[in-house]
Amino acid sequence: MKQKRLKVATNLKKDYAYTSCLLLVCLLWSSISFGQTINNNWEKDLTKSLEEFIECAKSSKDKSTCGATVGQSLSTVYRQDAFFSQKLNRFLVSNEISKIVEGSDRWKLMGYAYDQKVLDQAQQVANANKPVIAVYRMNGSAHVVLILPGTIHYSGSWGFSVPNSASFSYIDPDKSYVGKGLSYGFAKSMMKDITLYKMTY
């Protein structure tokens, strides 16, 4: 009887150890796949980056040197260094980012800015703490806007509801912003040339 109880206790310990191990693996996989972290102070930090960017863009003779703020904003908000180049030892600028995401396995094309479903999904993905960017391409140049967590709002100029975003324009620093709708930085005629991408893991 005593040996039988001992055997049962041993089996229970094994089952408990197996279950605990399995649970730990599931939790780790879940945290990697779904529990993407975000900077809880991203609004404050990104606003500070905006102020520094505008000061740089207005005072620097070569405004393009300020353009790394675009790539850095991804790290500031989503804690992802996908736009940091180890080779160049700096964050990438819009033209470089535009080339990287096109055809990249890490960035999935969601669609165009003139599709309301795409705009809705962009905000949903950002609210799930996963990076989304909008890329405007025209005549060999590009401008990249970061989609931010927040609320989607109707834009009278676009006639669509647009996601929350941040834009750093060294060509026209005064049009740079944090926490405004995607339509704030683009005219309606530019929608056909704006594509949205989400980062995959």
Image (cartoon, rainbow, N blue to C red):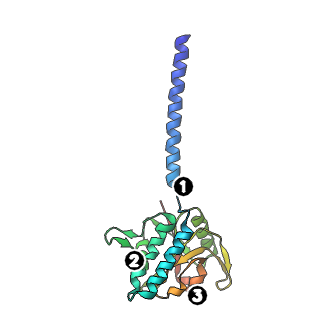
Give x and y (percent) for residue 2. Answer: 54, 11
Sequence-wise, the earlier of marks 1 and 2 is 1
Q: Is residue 124 left or right of residue 173?
A: right
Which residue type does callout 3 highlight?
A: Ala
What number is the disc on residue 187?
A: 3
Which residue type does callout 2 highlight?
A: Glu
For disc 1, the neighbor class at 10 Å (few under 14, some 14 to 19, many from 20) is some
- Residue found at x 44% / y 83%: 56
For disc 2, the neighbor class at 10 Å (few under 14, some 14 to 19, many from 20) is some
Question: Height in image: 61 above or below 11?
Answer: below
- Residue found at x 48% / y 71%: 73
Relative depth, front residue between 137 and 87: 87
What number is the disc on residue 96?
A: 2
Instruction: Find disc 1 in the rendering and name its residue.
Output: 35
Give the SS element for disc 2: helix
Question: Height in image: 197 above or below 174?
Answer: above
Mark 2 and mark 3 in contact (Cβ < 8 Å)?
A: no
Sequence-wise, the earlier of marks 3 and 2 is 2
Q: How far apart are marks 1 and 2 (CA)?
A: 29 Å
Q: How far apart are marks 3 and 2 (CA)?
A: 23 Å
Sequence-wise, the earlier of marks 1 and 3 is 1
Relative depth, front residue between 52 and 85: 52
Whether residue 106 is visible to the viewer of this picture, yes or no, is yes
